Image (cartoon, grey):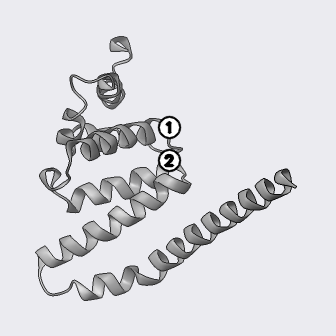
Amino acid sequence: MLKEMETASTSTTASTSTTVVESIKSFLSKNKSLLTELANSTESDLAIVHSAYYECAMTYRKAVGPPEAFYKEAISYLHYTPLDTISPTKAQYDLATDLSLSALTGKGVYNFGEVVHNNKLILDVLRGTENEYLVKLMQASAEGDVDSL
């Protein structure tokens, strides 16, 4: 009896998670154009709306994958979001780690320079930490410097 209850609980949780993820995906798909339309007033309003949209999309892609989709959404998020507005520092650290890993493992992601040169500040968060090797790996990959690996 206990085993049956555990199995039912697990399948209910999995089905609820799937339902939530599908509803978020549907919401993002349906409302992207609406969010753009709402932000037509000024550039700063547009940046705020896009930042919120890409943060949501990035979080969704982190949960369901694939890594290359997370990478794309994270780069877009960083385009519209100043690094100093992402707090706490733990959130910056997690984003830098996840962005690096998704760039290195994502299928079809070849432009490491987009992170290394255009988003250098996010990688600087990893310097002096246990994940500093990701910065070095990203730089070596961007420059094609296999010897430094």
* x 55%, y 56%: residue: 64
Instruction: List the residue tagged with mark 2.
Output: 67
Residue 57 higher or lower than 144, as above or below: below
Residue at 51% across, 54% down: 63
Quarter of the image for the C terminus: give it.
Answer: top left
Horizontal relation, residue 18 to residue 101: left or right: right
Which residue is depicted at the point 47% across and 83% down? Answer: 30
Using the rendered image of the protein, determine whether residue 108 is visible from the camera's viewpoint: yes
Q: Residues within 10 Å of mark 1 (few under 14, many from 20)?
A: some
Q: Amino acid at mark 2?
A: Pro
Q: Quadrant of residue 16?
A: bottom right
Q: Is residue 110 visible?
A: no
Please identify the quadrant where the N terminus is shown.
bottom right
Q: Quadrant of residue 14?
A: bottom right
Q: Is residue 49 left or right of residue 15?
A: left
Q: Residue 86 vs residue 105: left or right?
A: left
> Pointer 1: what residue?
105
Q: Nearer the viewer, residue 78 or 18?
A: 18
